[in-house]
Image (tube, rainbow, N blue to C red):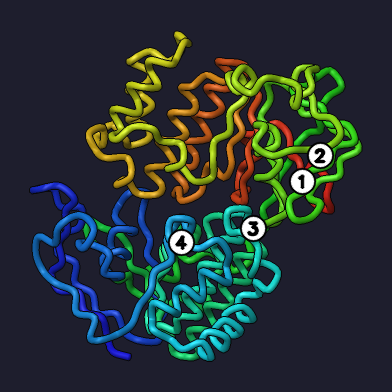
Amino acid sequence: MKNIKINNLSFAYEKNNNILNNINLNLEPGKFYLLSGPTGCGKSTLLKLLANLYPKFTGKITSGSINWNHSTYAIMFQNPSQQFTMATAREEIIFALENLQKTPPEYENRLKIATKFTQITNLLDQKISTMSGGEKQRVALAVLIAMDVDYLILDEPFASCDPESRIFLINKLIQLKKIGKTIILSDHNLNNYQKICDDILQYQNNSFIFLSKSEKNKILKPENIETKLNFSLPSKKDKSAFILNQTSISQNRLLLNQKSLSIPQEKITLITGANGIGKSSFFDTLTKIHPYSGSITYQNNEISKLKSRKYLLHVAQVFQNASNQFLKVTVADEINLSKKLCKNNFFSDKKIQEMLKLLNLDTHLNQIVYSLSGGQQKKLQILLMLLSGHDVLLFDEPLSGLDKNSSEIVLQLIRETQKELHQTILIISHQLQEMDKWCDYHLVFANQQLTYVEN
């Protein structure tokens, strides 16, 4: 394995508008590199350049070069769904090995190693489309392990992982580093990296530079930060938006077996739980995508008996994958479509412009939505869904891929809109810090039950 050298590299998506300028890096084998910087600064762009996806598929290197020195590499996208081509994890891993022209005996050996390493035995023959975001990220890592490359390039690989899965996967990366693999990883959450991180590449002035050892130690967070949350329990005076009674939800296995539950109207409720527990399936059920048994009522009407078209004018799901929600080509097109559909005076042109500026999207109006960074797509998606003015919004991991400042702005806009429009909002999130500041109640999904907690 040899160094990857980046010499005076500049890159642009549009002519005369470099997103990255004069990057000079020497990436040594066997090290762990952490990319740090705000949402939309160019972390994903740099990683895709390292993975030789750019400028092959978009953009242009306006100066400089990358020398891979015959090293092998593979990338895991921020949204792993974008790189899956087969139905199951087993088929996906074998397909990747076929592309590397490995023999059938090699398939089985590498499949066994990757499955054991990432502990995805129970996911091997499950349809990837039915997996949680965290489970998909674990499968994507298994594909890279099976490929046995020199450089593992990971773009926000823990964005949808629960805290336990995050620590498990970081420990796996530590093992990979010990056997000589080089890992280049971007993350907004700097927890748990003290034992593994060799160098931090921080974004500064359209470039990435190495931090000094003292600077690195200053910004890396302690290994264990306890998140203390303080919530109140719902009051008997709260009106109910949804009521569950003897409700069961299944997908490959029983996910929810709820005797009774009331979800308050005109409140924001946080939902937490382990990857694969059934949180997204619960949202799919509330939006009539997934069936259920027993009873779920919305404003005292059984959901299964309501006509979908009319019901979904009131209740909307904000998907974990932002790009699934886009209908138009550019940011401006998406905004204009939402403005046409918006029937609420709260969202004046002035207000929408203020929101775009807060989200740092005001300078991206002519950009193709699919060329935005993952974090920028997430911010646009949330803005569009707020403009929709639904009575109920179900946010599935709205903070995924966002830096701390962007997360606070997004939560601020959600809370402001909720209060103004008297909305009922449910938020699934693995990012818990200060969530009690923005949410009224907290439901924990565990042991096939949803239970309110105070902390």
**Chain-order first, disc 1 or disc 4:** 4
User: From what the image shows, is residue 173 above or below residue 125?
Assistant: below
Describe the element under mark 4 as helix, strand or loop. loop
- What amino acid is labelled 2 in the image? Tyr
Question: Which residue was labeled with disc 3?
Answer: 162
**Mark 1 vs mark 4, CA separation in Å:** 33 Å
Locate residue 430 relative to residue 23 in the image: left or right. right
- What amino acid is labelled 4 in the image? Thr
**Chain-order first, disc 2 or disc 1:** 1
The 10 Å Cα crowd at callout 3, few under 14, some 14 to 19, many 20 or more, is: some
- What amino acid is labelled 3 in the image? Asp
**Mark 4 vs mark 3, CA separation in Å:** 25 Å
- Asked if labels 1 and 2 touch by Cβ distance under 8 angstroms, the answer is yes
**Mark 2 vs mark 1, CA separation in Å:** 6 Å
Describe the element under mark 3 as helix, strand or loop. loop
**Chain-order first, disc 4 or disc 3:** 4
Looking at the rendered structure, which numbered label has been put on residue 85? 4
Question: Which residue was labeled with disc 2?
Answer: 452
User: From what the image shows, is residue 94 above or below residue 278?
Assistant: below
**Mark 1 vs mark 3, CA separation in Å:** 13 Å
Question: Which residue was labeled with disc 1?
Answer: 444
- Asked if labels 3 and 1 touch by Cβ distance under 8 angstroms, the answer is no
Q: Where is residue 406 drawn, in percent x and y? A: 43, 42
Describe the element under mark 2 as helix, strand or loop. strand
**Chain-order first, disc 1 or disc 3:** 3
- Residue 9 visible in the displayed image: yes
Q: Nearer the viewer, mark 1 or mark 4?
A: 4
The residue at the point 43 percent across, 28 percent down is: 384
The residue at the point 63 percent across, 71 percent down is: 168
The residue at the point 51 percent across, 49 percent down is: 400
The 10 Å Cα crowd at callout 1, few under 14, some 14 to 19, many 20 or more, is: some
User: From what the image shows, is residue 437 above or below residue 400?
Assistant: above
